[in-house]
Structures are given as C-alpha cells and as structure tokens.
Amino acid sequence: MVKLISKEFAKFVAVGLLNTLLTYLIYLLLDHWVNYTMAYAVGYSAGIVFSYFMNTFFVFKSKPSIKKGMQFPLVYGVQFILSEVILYICINRLGLNAKLAPLLVIILTIPVTFLLSKLIIKRPT
C-alpha cells in the first residue's frame, strides 16, 4: 500500500493545528487588555516560538540552536508572501470566491512551509 503522507508531515500538520489554536487563544485572552493588533502580534509571535520548538523536538527530532531559532521566522515570512500572491491569483485571476480562496491558499502553502521548516530545523549546526 502506498503511503500518501509521511508520519513527519502528519505530525507537522498536527503541530500546525495546535499552533493555530494556541495563537487564537492568546489573541482572545489579550484582546481584553490590549489593542487587537497587539494581541494578534503577541499571539502570532508566541505561535512561531511554539512551532519552532514543537517542530524541532516532536516533528523533526532535531536539536534546537540559536541560529536555527533566528532563521525559523523566515519560514513564516515566505509563507505570508506566497499566501498573498496565491490569494491574489485565486481571487483576481481565477475568479474564486474571496471567502473560500484562503482555504485553498492554506492547502497549497502547507507543503512549502513543511519543506522550509525541515530545511532549517534539520540543517546541521
């Protein structure tokens, strides 16, 4: 039987779901005391840190380092830019529904995020 996805990728997706939940919960908690943009920025930043450590230890079974930790946010920068480009194409060129297009964007960017994360985290120190 052919494996459609690796255990590593399945773990990566699971960590991503937990990360999304954590980011959202932090946002909801902080939104009571600070401006929503600050609440989101703190939640998003915490999510990047959480994602780095969970992907390092649980998904890729690697050792963390300061260098890798400093490079890891680049994954999210690339993901954001790629997401914006794909979203623009989906809505403005392909005519997809603006409420549904982000779901396609997420599906299309997960493999890229996985590969970039793996590249940084598994790189020898």
Image (cartoon, rainbow, N blue to C red):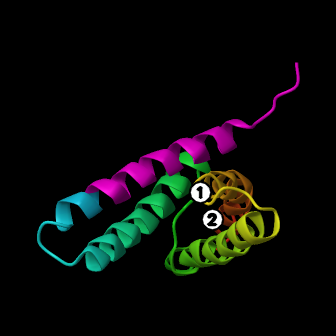
- The reply, left or right, for residue 61 in relation to residue 25 is right
| Disc 2 to disc 1: CB gap under 8 Å | yes
Front residue of 116/91: it is: 91
- The total number of labels drawn is 2
Residue at 70 percent across and 60 percent down: it is 109
Q: Residue furthest top?
A: 1
The residue identified by callout 2 is 121
- The reply, left or right, for residue 44 in relation to residue 99 is left
Residue 84 in the magenta stretch? The answer is no
Q: Is residue 56 above or below residue 72?
A: above
Q: Which residues are magenta?
A: 1-25
Q: Position of residue 116 (x, y in %)?
A: 70, 66
Q: Quadrant of residue 113?
A: bottom right
Q: Position of residue 88 (x, y in %)?
A: 71, 72
Front residue of 18/102: it is: 102
Look at the numbered disc 1 and give the secondary structure of its residue: loop
Residue at 67 percent across and 55 percent down: it is 110
Q: Position of residue 107 (x, y in %)?
A: 69, 50
Q: Quadrant of residue 123?
A: bottom right
Q: How far apart, in angstroms, are the residues tagged by discs 2 and 1? A: 7 Å
The residue identified by callout 1 is 62
Q: Is residue 82 above or below residue 110?
A: below
Q: Position of residue 58 (x, y in %)?
A: 52, 46
Q: Given the image, on which type of amino acid does mark 1 rest?
A: Ser
